[in-house]
Image: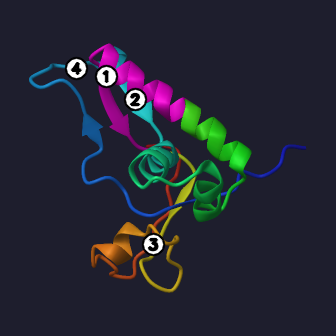
């Protein structure tokens, strides 16, 4: 029997979930879909400067899991940039930080940017 999937802690959703070439008319074959937890590893490691170990602690998952998520995220990001494809961030198994009592860690965007309104939502894999 397979192990149950562990919900990944995610600080916040991106301000925009769709990125791509300016003025492009895209169809489904030109989309790259990045899951929210993949976005979060890019944010924590590349933007915030965390190590994979620190990222794993903040997201409440194993370092080896972070490594796999991060590799997939970087590949999707590169494919979008190099091949001029639209990147859409959605879906996955994640739980959003609520901004105070159960903040996600020292890099909590909700807390730092004063958006701690006390909400929490779960992602549901179907977009």
The residue depicted at 58 percent of the width and 64 percent of the height is 58
Q: Which residues are magenta?
A: 72-90
Front tag of 2 and 4: 2
Front tag of 4 and 1: 1
- CA separation in Å, label 2 and label 4: 17 Å
Q: Quick one: quadrant of the C terminus?
A: top left
The residue depicted at 27 percent of the width and 38 percent of the height is 18
Magenta segment: does it hold 126?
no
- Give residue 81's mark: 1
Secondary structure at badge 4 equals loop
- CA separation in Å, label 2 and label 3: 27 Å
Pointers 4 and 3 in contact (C-beta within 8 Å) = no
Q: Quick one: quadrant of the N terminus?
A: top right
Q: Position of residue 93 (x, y in %)?
A: 57, 51
Q: Position of residue 51 (x, y in %)?
A: 58, 51
For disc 2, the marked residue is 77
The residue depicted at 72 percent of the width and 52 percent of the height is 62
For disc 4, the marked residue is 26
Q: How many marks?
A: 4
Pointers 1 and 2 in contact (C-beta within 8 Å) = yes
Number of other residues with Cα within 10 Å of mark 4, as a class: few under 14, some 14 to 19, many 20 or more: few
Question: Closer to the N terminus: mark 2 or mark 3?
Answer: 2
For disc 3, the marked residue is 120
Q: Is residue 56 left or right of residue 83?
A: right
């Amino acid at each position: 029997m397979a192990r149950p999937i562990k919900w990944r802690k995610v600080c916040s959703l991106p301000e925009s979930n769709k990125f791509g070439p300016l003025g492009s008319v895209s169809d489904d074959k030109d989309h790259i879909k990045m899951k929210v937890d993949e976005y979060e590893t890019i944010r924590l490691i590349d933007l915030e400067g965390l190590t994979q170990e620190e990222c794993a602690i903040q997201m409440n998952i194993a370092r080896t899991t972070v490594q796999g998520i991060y590799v997939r995220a970087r590949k999707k990001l590169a494919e979008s940039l190099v091949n001029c494809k639209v990147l859409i961030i959605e879906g996955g198994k994640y739980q959003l930080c609520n901004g105070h009592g159960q903040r996600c860690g020292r890099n909590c965007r909700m807390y730092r940017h004063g958006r701690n309104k006390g909400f929490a939502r779960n992602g549901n894999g179907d977009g």
